[in-house]
Image (cartoon, rainbow, N blue to C red):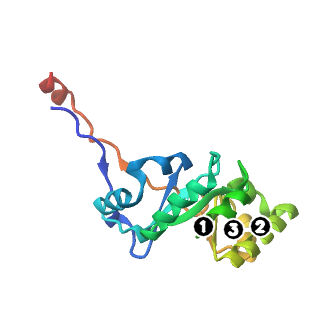
């Protein structure tokens, strides 16, 4: 008998009112199985309505054609999905991506957050980006918070959401497979 595969934790494990953030490479937008109704069916198969799913567009891969990309994202937002630009402050031209995509969330890269409590430049960049995010109706999420000083500084700057080892370790999406005993292996041969 083969060992069972990974057991999924379904969406019932998500607290009420919470959202699931999913990292997405821009190239996925061109995959027919990742568009519109197909993505809605996938979310619903896992017990999620689209309004609980936020697609995090990573800034670590360039977008070849913003018009086509924005059209694909527009369709997904019409179905109820939200958009986040991940890794703001690192990688490719994040401001161009933000200008074209009008995301609901901006996730500040951990390099912008690291030692923000002792860096005047990082604080001022964050202050400017926070004012910008407020004007366009986006919510900022600071990534990589690892110290009390970073957390306190972010709170003083008006950043209300964050993630990082100081706040909690990431939860596993899959549980490990059940252990296989030697007698099961012998019986399967």
Task: Residue 97: give x, y in percent of width and height.
Answer: 67, 58
Left or right: residue 153 compared with residue 178: right
Q: CA distance from mark 3 to mark 1?
A: 24 Å
Of callouts 1 and 2, the N-terminal one: 1
| Image side of residue 154 versus residue 66, left or right | right
Q: Tell me the element at label 2.
A: helix
Mark 3 lies on a secondary structure that is helix
Residue 137, given in percent of the width and then of the height, sits at: 64, 77
**Residue pointed to by mark 2:** 126
Residue at (42, 76) in percent of width and height: 17
Rendered residue at 60%/67% (across/down): 103
Q: Earlier in the sequence, mark 3 or mark 1?
A: 1
Label 3, residues with CA under 10 Å away: few <14, some 14-19, many ≥20: many
Left or right, residue 89 beside residue 47: right
Q: In 3D space, how far apart are the residues under numbered discs 3 and 2 (Cα atoms)?
A: 13 Å
Contact, mark 3 vs mark 2 (Cβ under 8 Å):
no
Q: Which mark is residue 151?
A: 3
- Up-down: is 71 above or below 160? above
Quarter of the image with the N terminus is top left
* Image location (x, y in percent) of residue 82: 50, 67
Q: Earlier in the sequence, mark 3 or mark 2?
A: 2
Residue 103, labelled with which disc?
1
């Amino acid at each position: 008998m083969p060992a069972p595969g990974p057991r999924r934790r379904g969406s019932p494990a998500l607290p009420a009112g919470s959202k699931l953030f999913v990292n997405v490479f821009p190239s996925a937008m061109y995959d027919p199985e990742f568009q519109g109704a197909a993505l809605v069916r996938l979310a619903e198969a896992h017990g999620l309505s689209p309004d609980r799913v936020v697609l995090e567009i990573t800034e670590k891969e360039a977008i070849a054609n913003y018009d086509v990309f924005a059209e694909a994202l527009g369709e997904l937002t019409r179905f109820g999905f939200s958009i986040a630009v991940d890794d703001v402050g690192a990688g490719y031209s994040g401001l161009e991506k933000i200008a074209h995509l009008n995301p609901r969330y901006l996730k500040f890269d951990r390099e912008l957050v690291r030692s923000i409590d002792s860096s005047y430049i990082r604080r001022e960049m964050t202050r400017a980006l926070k004012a910008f995010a407020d004007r366009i109706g986006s919510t900022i999420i600071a990534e990589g918070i690892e110290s009390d000083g970073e957390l306190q500084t972010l709170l003083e700057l008006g950043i209300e959401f964050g993630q990082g080892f100081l706040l909690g370790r990431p939860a596993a999406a899959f549980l490990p497979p059940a252990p296989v005993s030697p007698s099961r292996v012998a019986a399967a041969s």
